[in-house]
Image (cartoon, rainbow, N blue to C red):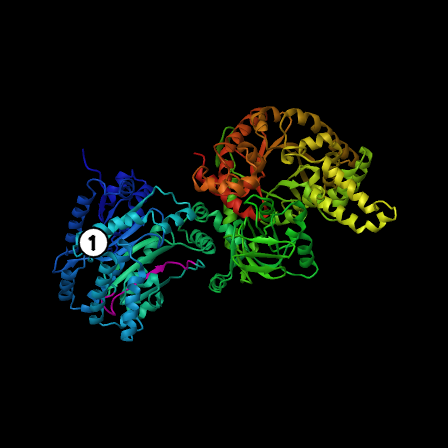
């Protein structure tokens, strides 16, 4: 049986491709990005030093056993002999010795996360041979002391300071400002001192045997795959742990041989802006880590034309070729040894979000890539970053250095906000509106009657709650930067201050909230605010994304080939709908009518309706609310049109009242405290025989009503369609308002599309009871107005029973909308806020759940119910419209799943619409119909 191939030479990329069955992605997975690209540069005859690559498969075997896999070391020795032949040098020989570097290289670039060792093969004997060969003693001992330092740090696990302290002390003794000021004799002395450091720290001498150096270095790179910084980086970037890293053993070329040698790192375009201009740094008489580590002040790459003009021209020609070859912006490393250029690495360069968009769009215009490739080059996260205020990076670093870090919590809603803190909604709103302050609202947690303060605030901070808590959901809906669950913060509402780690921040003082990272700072950190309409490249990219999704045969479903997903928005007010349209939404997937009830001028009427003691009194209060609801709905219909000329309406889904009625009343505890306070103040009146005041009597009545409405689990109690059946007058008013608004705007030339959604259906019998009554009202209104408008009635699928009986429910419902927040709660049996506060973080950390299911759709459980509902619903009604309006509607992974199961649309916060448009196109391209 042939031994498995663990090692590939610089000229064996064809064998790697054969093993990977011709799949470039599998070649990259086998050889790592660095190894695959070194091999490719060799194949296209660029100047690459001879090398070999130990595969990621060998690394994974090492992780299992702690030993090199059988046959690997012998293959390394064989490959080393081939490199010796190609370079004309001998590893470990005194005369013309071969030196090598040992570099990591995973499938996905992880800059600086794993280890590298340079100058392997140097020892006392080969150093003397190198001096004799080059006549450059300074260069040799500069390289030797670097090897001992890197080997000690990377391979032997010694602290960098053990060497840096010796180096800095010696430079100070010699009056040297930079390493380059040290003489050959100085570096020779340092080399000996570094050997002493190793002996004192480790109890043994620096290894003189070159093969031992190589073996230990390879092992160290394998180990670095599971080093903390590498693991942390993979967690942050969702790189799987089982990929492993390759190890590249590359013939050393030297940029520290004198002032006609050098090294550098460059990008073929500006990675910050995307501008088509070379961006990079170089150093003369240096090795690679000097540039990367900032040991010396570097020079801009364009200045190299003055120092080494021939090498610079060759470099520019090669990088132009590489960008065209890989059809992407390249990040390259190079060394010049005595005026001869060597390429040591090329890879697709990391870039900012704005650069990613500009480069993608520019490369389409340059005919380097297609529109489809451009869309896939930009991530939904890139778009999200571009649309939220961001802290100035310099200001961020300054705040950290000044010790102004305050706390960290859950990054619930991205963006940056700076403002003065206030601890209740009323004060926050007053300060924002009346005094024009920038406000950060701080609360232990928020509830619906805090919404006005939240909307007035520039940012929100809570000490409790998770990523789908009320504060988080509302903040995302309205694009307010928000950090929740900052549990280390102690909020003292009585003293109007908060405290964390000994830092006290009082009401009215300034803080800076970063909803993207979850960090909070005291004082002000500068922010910049992007505007979508100004981002021409992003608008161009999103228009291409829409084109992809609009292709009629892009997706294969059970009903045949269809177009991709549309993106709608959740919008409760006309201004939200206008923003959603400006961001590219083509429908409203959720209008929560109860949010309109919380308006300060409407809430007393709502409370009067709730406290009404007869149907007639309730209807009287509802009649007062009807004009406001009608006006809101008319505004939504007018905002949601294709253009102001044709006025063709996009669908507007209006959800009838959903939450329990007690949410519109003050909390029982607050009422009780207020009654007691008023009674104490009224003691003098009681003493003379007078009873409660009218105000106290009114509060008693409300308190009694709140007590009577108490439910052990209100989220599973009298709400949704159940509320509509018990108190039909409420939804009857809402439906009348919807149809009156639709008819009124139709008379103005608009073509509205009203879709009425009945929430929380669990059985077809509920729809059979309520829907005909509501349809009858709609028909009556259209008859009264003499206008016919397009409309549908449908339901939210939030209860597992609704999903498994979807075929029945679709007999009446013309559309389904998945309310995945509640569907997730009921499928898992989790209380969302309790789960996120108490155990979900632990579940994810321990691998019990892959992700928080309230942030990313649970495909195996909740998703299976959704798939069942779509298939069964369309078996009854083939043209059934299906969407999603829960928080998951803005999550890229969840959007992909909605594409896969055949949803017509996803609906999300207006601020997430551009993100969802790109994610929908990604899903369409990833699952493109054959």
- Prevailing secondary structure of the magenta residues: loop
Q: Is residue 124 above or below residue 180?
A: above
Residue position for label 1: 213
| Figure quadrant of residue 773 | top right
Front residue of 732 and 155: 155
Q: Which of 23 and 798 lies nearest the eye of the viewer?
A: 798
Work out whether residue 540 can be spotted. no
Residue range (magenta): 256-271
State the image quarter where residue 174 is shown: bottom left
Tell me if residue 454 can be seen: yes
Q: Please report the residue visible at 81 percent of the width from the left and 38 percent of the height from the top.
A: 620
Circle count: 1
Q: Is residue 290 magenta?
A: no
Picture coordinates of residue 239, whole percent (x, y): 39, 45
The crowding category of the residue bearing disc 1, from other C-alpha atoms within 10 Å (few below 14, some 14 to 19, many at least 20), is many
Residue 760, by quadrant, is top right
Instruction: Answer whether residue 257 is magenta in the image.
Output: yes
Tell me residue 554's x, y (percent).
Answer: 48, 37
- Viewer-proximal residue among 798 and 505: 505
In what quadrant of the picture does the C terminus appear?
A: top left
Left or right: residue 423 compared with residue 288: right
Residue at 46% across, 37% down: 849
Residue 222 vs residue 259, the one in the foreground: 222
Task: Estimate the x, y position of residue 207 in percent, counting from the top left.
Answer: 19, 56
Residue at x 25%, y 72% (from the top left corner): 182
Give the percent coordinates (x, y) of residue 840: 50, 40
For residue 594, above or below residue 256: above
On screen, residue 321 versus residue 919, left or right, reads left
Q: Secondary structure at mark 1?
A: helix
Q: Does 861 sit above or below residue 437? A: above
Q: Which quadrant: the N terminus?
A: top left
Is 925 left or right of 824, judged from the image as shown?
Answer: left
């Amino acid at each position: 049986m042939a031994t498995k191939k663990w090692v590939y030479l610089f000229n064996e990329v064809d064998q790697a491709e054969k093993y990977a069955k011709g799949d470039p992605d599998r070649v990259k997975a086998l050889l790592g990005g660095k190894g695959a690209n070194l091999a490719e540069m060799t194949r296209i005859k660029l100047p690459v030093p001879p090398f070999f690559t130990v595969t990621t498969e060998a690394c994974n075997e090492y992780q299992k056993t702690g030993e090199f896999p059988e046959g690997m070391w012998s293959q390394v020795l064989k490959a080393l002999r081939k490199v010796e032949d190609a370079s004309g040098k001998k590893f470990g020989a005194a005369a013309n010795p071969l030196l090598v570097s040992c570099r990591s290289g995973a499938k996905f670039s992880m800059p600086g996360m794993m280890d590298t060792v340079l100058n392997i093969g140097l020892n006392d004997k080969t150093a003397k041979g190198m001096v004799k060969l080059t006549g450059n003693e300074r260069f040799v001992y500069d390289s030797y002391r670097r090897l001992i330092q890197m080997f000690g740090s990377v391979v032997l696990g010694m602290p960098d300071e053990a060497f840096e302290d010796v180096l800095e002390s010696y430079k100070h003794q010699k009056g040297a400002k930079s390493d380059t000021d040290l003489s050959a004799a100085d570096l020779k002395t340092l080399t000996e001192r570094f050997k002493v450091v190793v002996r004192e720290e480790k109890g043994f001498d620096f290894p003189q045997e070159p093969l031992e150096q190589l073996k230990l270095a390879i092992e160290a790179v394998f180990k670095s795959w599971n080093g903390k910084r590498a693991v942390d980086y993979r967690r942050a970037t969702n790189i799987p742990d089982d990929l492993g890293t390759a190890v590249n053993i590359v013939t050393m070329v030297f940029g520290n041989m004198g002032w006609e040698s050098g090294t550098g790192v460059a990008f073929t375009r500006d990675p910050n802006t995307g501008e088509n201009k070379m961006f990079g740094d170089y150093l003369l008489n240096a090795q690679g880590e000097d540039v990367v580590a900032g040991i010396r002040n570097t020079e801009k790459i364009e200045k190299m034309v003055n120092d080494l003009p021939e090498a610079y021209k060759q470099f520019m020609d090669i990088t132009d070729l590489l960008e065209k070859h890989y059809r992407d912006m390249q990040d390259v490393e190079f060394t010049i040894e005595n005026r001869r250029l060597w390429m040591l690495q090329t890879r697709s360069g990391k870039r900012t979000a704005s650069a990613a968009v500009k480069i993608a769009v520019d490369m389409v215009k340059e005919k380097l890539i297609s529109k489809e490739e451009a869309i896939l080059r930009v991530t939904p996260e890139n778009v999200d970053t571009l649309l939220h205020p961001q802290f100035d990076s310099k200001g961020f670093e300054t705040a950290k250095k000044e010790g102004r870090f305050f706390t960290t919590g859950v990054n619930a809603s991205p963006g940056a906000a700076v403002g003065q803190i206030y601890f209740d909604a009323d004060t926050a709103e007053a300060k924002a509106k009346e005094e024009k302050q920038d406000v950060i609202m701080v609360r232990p947690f928020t509830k619906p009657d805090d919404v006005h303060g939240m909307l007035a605030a520039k940012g929100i901070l809570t000490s409790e709650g998770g990523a789908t808590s009320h504060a988080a959901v509302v903040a995302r809906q309205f694009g307010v930067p928000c950090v929740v669950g900052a549990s280390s913060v102690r909020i003292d509402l009585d003293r109007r201050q908060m405290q964390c780690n000994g830092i006290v921040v009082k009401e009215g003082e300034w803080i800076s909230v970063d909803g993207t990272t979850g960090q909070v700072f005291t004082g002000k950190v500068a922010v910049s605010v992007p505007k979508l309409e100004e981002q021409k490249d992003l608008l161009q990219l999103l228009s291409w994304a829409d084109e992809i999704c609009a292709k009629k045969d892009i997706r294969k479903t059970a009903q045949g080939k269809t177009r991709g997903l549309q993106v709608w928005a959740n919008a409760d007010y006309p201004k939200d709908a206008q923003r959603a349209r400006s961001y590219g939404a083509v429908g409203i997937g959720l209008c929560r009518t109860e949010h309109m009830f919380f308006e300060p001028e409407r809430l007393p009427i709502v409370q009067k309706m709730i406290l009404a003691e007869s149907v007639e009194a309730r209807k009287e209060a509802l009649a007062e609310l009807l004009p406001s609801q009608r006006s809101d709905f008319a505004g939504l219909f007018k905002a949601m049109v294709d253009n102001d000329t044709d006025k063709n309406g996009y669908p507007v889904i209006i959800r009838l009242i959903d939450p329990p009625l007690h949410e519109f009343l003050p909390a029982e505890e607050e009422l009780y405290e207020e009654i007691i306070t008023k009674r104490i103040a009224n003691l003098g009146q009681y003493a003379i025989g007078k009873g409660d005041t009218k105000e106290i009597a009114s509060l008693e009545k409300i308190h009694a009503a709140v007590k009577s409405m108490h439910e052990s689990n209100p989220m599973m109690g009298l709400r949704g369609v159940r509320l509509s059946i018990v108190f039909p007058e409420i939804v009857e008013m809402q439906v009348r308002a919807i149809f009156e608004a639709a008819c009124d705007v139709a008379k103005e030339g608009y073509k509205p599309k009203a879709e009425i959604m009945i929430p929380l259906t669990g059985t077809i019998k509920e729809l059979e009871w309520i829907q005909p009554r509501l349809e009858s009202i709609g028909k009556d209104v259209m008859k009264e107005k003499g206008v016919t408008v397009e409309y549908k009635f449908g339901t939210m699928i939030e209860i597992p029973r609704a999903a498994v009986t979807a075929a029945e429910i679709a007999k009446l419902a013309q559309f389904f909308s998945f309310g995945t927040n509640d569907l997730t709660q009921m499928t898992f049996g989790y209380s969302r806020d309790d789960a996120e506060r108490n155990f979900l973080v632990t579940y994810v950390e321990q691998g019990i759940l892959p992700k928080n299911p309230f942030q990313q759709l649970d495909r195996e459980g909740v998703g299976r119910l959704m798939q069942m509902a779509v298939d069964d619903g369309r078996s009854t009604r083939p043209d059934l419209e299906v969407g999603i309006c829960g928080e998951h509607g803005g999550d890229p992974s969840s959007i992909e799943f909605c594409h896969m199961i055949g949803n017509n649309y996803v609906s999300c916060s207006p601020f997430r619409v551009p993100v969802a448009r790109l994610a929908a196109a990604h899903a369409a391209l990833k699952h493109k119909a054959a």
